[in-house]
Amino acid sequence: MKRRTTTAVTAFLVIAGVVLAAGCGGGGNGNGKSSSGAPAFSSSELASLPTKNWITNGGTISNQRYSPLTQLNAGNVGRLKGIWHIHLRSGTAGKYSGEAQPIVYNNVIYVVTGADDVFAIDAKTGAKKWTYRAHLNQQIKTICCGWTNRGVALGDGKVYLGQLNGKLVALNQQTGRIVWSTQVARYQQGYTITNAPLYYNGRVYTGVSG
């Protein structure tokens, strides 16, 4: 039952992201351009309430999880319907959990599964723009709290994720290809990364579990 619940939550978040992106248009929390990758977001942009995109986990660096948009309200929420759905076909086994909050920028949704696979999805059509496969070692035995990933970060034209094998990885935002990878901790010593990284002032912050 737990696996079904978390999988359903992931599917719902993808659909909700479609609605948000379709109603917002381009830009960062303030002023990005649709023809380019995400900028090196300033601290003020990351602290501002998300009126155009959802550029960091929780909406702001305060993790408020609040949107000031008014298109959806008590009077019309009952008419809200799904536009599309997509089967990511990743992290579907019983050991995985879907706990990630999608990031939305310029009508593209960036989401990661419990298998540390990352997908860039067109928010208008549901089409996959690119896929990154982590190819985790399935023999990892040091995970304390299940095979999961709680989100990615975005900034300076890159998508950042922490992996269960202790790596912090930066992906090219346009292609999904690895730009760099750093071994923050080793799973052989009992450490993993499940948290969503934080991009701030040109740096990427992460923690480890173990």
Image: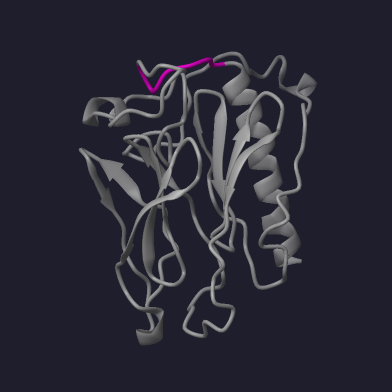
- The quarter of the image holding the C terminus is bottom left
15 versus 22 height, above or below: below
Residue at point 40% right, 79% down? 187
Residue 93, horizontal then vertical, whole percent: 72, 69
Residue at point 54% right, 60% down? 116
Tally of numbered tags: 0
Residue 68 lies left or right of residue 114; in this view the side is left
Residue 186, horizontal then vertical, whole percent: 35, 78
Q: Residue 25 colored magenta?
A: yes
The kind of secondary structure the magenta stretch mainly shows is loop
Residue 135, horizontal then vertical, whole percent: 56, 67
- Colour approach in the figure: one colour
Start-end of magenta stretch: 24-30
- The quarter of the image holding the N terminus is bottom right
Q: Quadrant of residue 98?
A: bottom right
Residue closest to the eye, 171 or 44: 171
Residue at point 29% right, 25% down? 45
Q: Residue 102 colored magenta?
A: no
Q: Quadrant of residue 61?
A: top left
Residue 5 lies left or right of residue 38; in this view the side is right
Residue at point 30% right, 43% down? 199
Residue 58, horizontal then vertical, whole percent: 43, 40
